[in-house]
Image (cartoon, grey):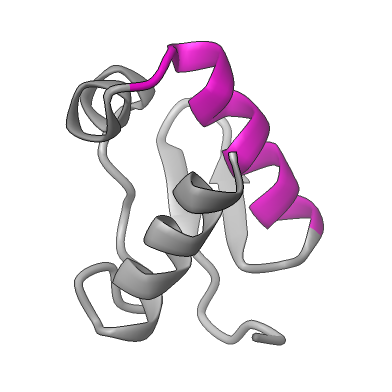
Amino acid sequence: MDELLDALMGKIKDGTYPPGSQLPSGRALADVYDVSQSTISRAVARLRKQGVLVGRPGRGVFVAESNRN
């Protein structure tokens, strides 16, 4: 999962997923990174705990407007 976290953080840092942008669905990310949706869920949960991502009920997961990383 560390590779997945690094890949997602790389996409956030390089502006692929800029602050305020919505991440693709868990299914889409699982397809892109060739991992299970549960692995994506765990990675997203870790990034949410770190304040990098925020969940918006009924809307999805977004890159925090300002994060600590």
Q: Is residue 25 above or below residue 8?
A: above
Q: Is 41 in front, or is 63?
A: 41
Tell me where residue 39 appears, x and y as whole percent.
55, 23
Q: Is residue 51 left or right of residue 2?
A: right
State the quadrant of the N terminus: top right
Residue displayed at 46% across by 68% down: 9
Q: Position of residue 57 (x, y in %)?
A: 57, 31
Residue 15 x/y as whole percent: 24, 82
Q: Nearer the viewer, residue 11 or 64?
A: 11
Residue, far front: 3
From what the image shows, is residue 67 above or below residue 40? below
Point out the stretch of residues depicted in magenta.
35-49
Q: Is residue 37 magenta?
A: yes
Q: Position of residue 42 (x, y in %)?
A: 66, 30
Q: Quadrant of the C terminus?
A: bottom right
Q: What is the count of numbered marks?
A: 0
Q: Quadrant of residue 27?
A: top left
Residue extending furthest right?
49
Q: Is residue 60 magenta?
A: no
Question: Magenta segment, principal secondary structure?
Answer: helix
Q: Is residue 4 above or below residue 27?
A: below
Which residue: 33% across, 48% down? Answer: 23
Residue 8 in the figure: left or right of residue 30: right
